[in-house]
Amino acid sequence: MASSLHNLSSYDPSSVPSAESFSFGIVVSEWHAEVTHALYEGCFQTLLQHGAKEENIHTAQVPGSFELPLGAQLLASSNRLDAVICLGCVIKGETPHNDYINRSVASALSQLSLVSSKPFIFGLLTPDTLEQAKDRAGGQFGNKGVEAAVTAIRMAALKHELNSPKKKIGY
């Protein structure tokens, strides 16, 4: 189904584990603040809705989306975090700058996740227009910040589950 036909941020809240015992980082790009701050609000409120404690949510702002990976690494190294959510927006322009930035951020966040065994969540909007960005930051197609928060909770819970001692039966 085409994204223009439904809210992409719909999910079943009962399927999301409790975030009560987890600590999160959120790194937000200041570029396109109207969009990124809406992503942040959706993300922050979703973490709270699923039990995260406000004092366990650490936030940092970076100038632009290209700086998200380093901001995320710095935030993770200065706090004990179960997941780091990166929120930004790169709107396609007349040059291919968006391709370079988007690929660079995606690659760096993937590397950070693999090297650290910690979820670094890609919450970067990559729209063609500002209107498309607004539609995905609390507009008609939902809020990608909500989706990033749900992903962070699920990945933190998965890591916790897989790192917990296995229960043995009968021995």
Image (cartoon, rainbow, N blue to C red):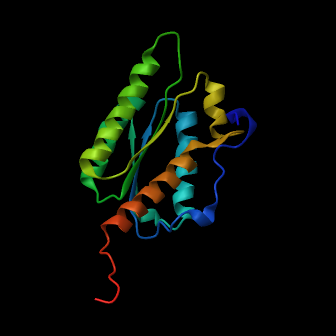
Front residue of 79/85: it is 85
**Residue shown at the point (44%, 20%) measured from the top left:** 99
Front residue of 120/158: it is 158
**Residue shown at the point (64%, 59%) measured from the top left:** 12
> Residue 46 in the image: x percent, y percent?
56, 57
> Residue 141 in the image: x percent, y percent?
68, 39
Front residue of 155/94: it is 155
Residue farthest to the front, as pictured: 170
Q: Is residue 129 above or below residue 70?
A: above
**Residue shown at the point (32%, 35%) measured from the top left:** 108
Residue farthest to the top, as pictured: 94
> Residue 9 in the image: x percent, y percent?
63, 47
Q: Quadrant of residue 152?
A: bottom left
Q: Is residue 125 left or right of residue 7?
A: left
Q: Quadrant of residue 55?
A: bottom left
Q: Quadrant of the N terminus?
A: top right
Q: Is residue 120 above or below residue 107?
A: below
> Residue 54 in the image: x percent, y percent?
46, 63
Q: Quadrant of residue 4?
A: top right
Q: Is residue 63 visible?
A: no
Q: Is residue 1 visible?
A: yes
